[in-house]
Image (cartoon, rainbow, N blue to C red):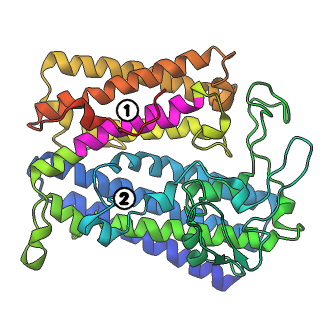
């Protein structure tokens, strides 16, 4: 990387680190009144601050790689992506609560743009982004990378976007253009460009191509150096990583000390913004329902059950990098963070679980302990023996552990009805269940 670009990138990181420091200082200086909403919002502030900081580090690593595409810098870019998922994965618990990350209507959506689908949409049709290779070695074509003009992603209602120059604007316009699988932006688009297609299993039932239980995608460095579309792949990485940072800056702004959404759920907006205040009851109802839906329907069902009961590596959350074991661990950790009002060893005060009677609390804690044992097992095996895409195979004894895990998570989701009730909020099982979840 030339000196000017390196200085600019370094200043960008310094600015965000300073921004992050302001977040943390604002949290520590805030006078806590012991409310659940203060605990929740301050925890969100720190978690999104970390996610933004890690996204900037990812963008910096990609900038360095794009200037000097060596094996060393390639590996560093991948490591930065893996690191960025650790903090972002924990933020996913803030979804499904009509909050800044994914509110679909009203002033919250108008203000923050419902950016979850831009940041973390999956599964994606990798053929839309770049080539894939079948078992015989044939490569597909007709994708964003090899199209140097107008590109139509296909699908119902799709529209043409000019990709002569791969830019943040072009990728944003293509994301979910014509269908949910037409993903062009976010973490998983970057993941695919970095790792390429994971070809461990030719038919999901036998190890037919790479013969490696610990083998993820193996995109060659030549795709970024000597291959004819090398510069376009680098441009894609730069634009997509820049957009991740931009989107997280927007979401994170909701949780600063003077963020409109943070003030709204604390009922602190005044003047012309006072009408945006969200009552304590409405805010807590949305939060508790969202937590239940996330752990029960999104994590247990969509991210675990679909993969293990299909079984299909294409349905695991981070299938190119084989990082799904960490997705499961961090997504669950995010749920636990909010339930216990803790994050990275810091106690944020009053917690939802505190209001439970002794018997119900013991039931919840026992269930969580069992869940955590299973997650630790999946994580350890994925790190040392065989990735999640092998563990979900019917012949693997771990598949039964994974099925039990999703069942226990579903029970935990239902128990959010009890947690809500203990905190003065009335919910039903239907409130903590996505009515459109996959029925398996």
Q: Is residue 261 magenta?
A: no
Q: Quadrant of residue 58?
A: bottom right
Query: Looking at the image, is 217 positioned above or below residue 186?
Result: above
Where residue 229 appears, x then y in whole percent? Answer: 83, 70
**Observer-nearest of 345 and 62:** 62
The numbered dot on residue 101 is 2
Q: Dot 1: what SS? A: helix
Residue 235 place in picture, x, y as percent: 70, 73
Task: Describe residue 432's horizontal placement relative to residue 144 as left or right.
Answer: left
- Sequence-wise first label, 1 or 2: 2
Residue behind mark 1: 296
| Quadrant in the rendering for residue 99 | bottom left
Camera-side residue of 318 and 38: 318
Q: Is residue 300 magenta?
A: yes
In the rendered view, tell whether residue 218 sits above or below residue 402.
below
Residue at 42 percent of width and 37 percent of height: 437
Find residue 247 and report its horizontal and vertical position in percent: 45, 67
């Amino acid at each position: 990387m030339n000196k000017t670009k390196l200085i600019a990138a370094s200043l960008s990181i310094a600015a965000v680190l300073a921004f992050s420091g302001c977040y943390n200082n604002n949290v520590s200086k805030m006078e806590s009144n012991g409310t659940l909403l203060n605990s929740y919002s301050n925890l969100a502030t720190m978690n999104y601050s970390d996610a933004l900081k890690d996204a900037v580090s990812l963008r910096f690593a990609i900038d360095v790689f794009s200037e000097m595409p060596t094996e060393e810098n390639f590996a560093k870019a991948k490591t930065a992506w893996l690191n960025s998922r650790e903090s972002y994965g924990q933020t996913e618990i803030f979804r499904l609560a009509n909050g800044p990350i994914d509110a679909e209507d009203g002033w919250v959506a108008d203000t923050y743009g419902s950016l979850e689908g831009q940041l973390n949409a999956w599964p994606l049709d990798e053929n839309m982004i770049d080539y894939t290779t079948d078992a015989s070695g044939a490569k597909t074509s007709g994708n964003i990378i090899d199209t140097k003009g107008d590109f139509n992603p296909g699908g119902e209602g799709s529209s043409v976007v000019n990709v002569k120059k791969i830019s943040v604007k072009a990728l944003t316009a293509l994301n979910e253009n014509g269908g949910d699988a037409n993903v062009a932006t976010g973490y998983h688009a970057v993941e695919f460009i970095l790792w390429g297609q994971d070809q461990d299993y030719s038919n999901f039932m036998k190890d037919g191509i790479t013969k490696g239980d610990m083998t993820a995608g193996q995109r060659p460095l030549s795709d970024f150096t000597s291959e004819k579309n090398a510069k376009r792949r680098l441009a894609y990485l730069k634009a997509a990583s820049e957009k991740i940072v931009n989107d997280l800056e927007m979401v994170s702004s909701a949780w600063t000390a003077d963020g409109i959404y943070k003030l709204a759920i604390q009922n602190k907006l005044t003047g012309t913004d006072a009408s945006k205040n969200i009552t304590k009851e409405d805010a807590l109802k949305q939060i508790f329902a969202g937590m239940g839906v996330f752990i029960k329907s999104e994590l247990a069902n969509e991210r675990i059950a679909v993969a293990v009961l299909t079984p299909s590596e294409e349905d695991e959350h981070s299938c190119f990098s084989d990082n799904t074991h960490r997705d499961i661990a961090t997504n669950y950790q995010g749920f636990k963070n909010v339930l216990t009002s803790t994050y990275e060893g810091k106690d944020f005060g009053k917690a939802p679980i505190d209001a439970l009677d002794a018997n119900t609390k013991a039931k919840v804690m026992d269930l969580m302990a069992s869940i955590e044992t299973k997650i630790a097992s999946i994580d350890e095996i994925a790190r040392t023996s065989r990735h999640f895409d092998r563990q979900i195979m019917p012949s693997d004894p771990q598949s039964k552990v994974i099925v039990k895990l999703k069942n226990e998570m579903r029970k935990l989701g239902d128990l959010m009805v009890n947690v809500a009730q203990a905190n003065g909020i009335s919910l039903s099982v239907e409130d903590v269940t996505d009515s459109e979840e996959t029925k398996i």
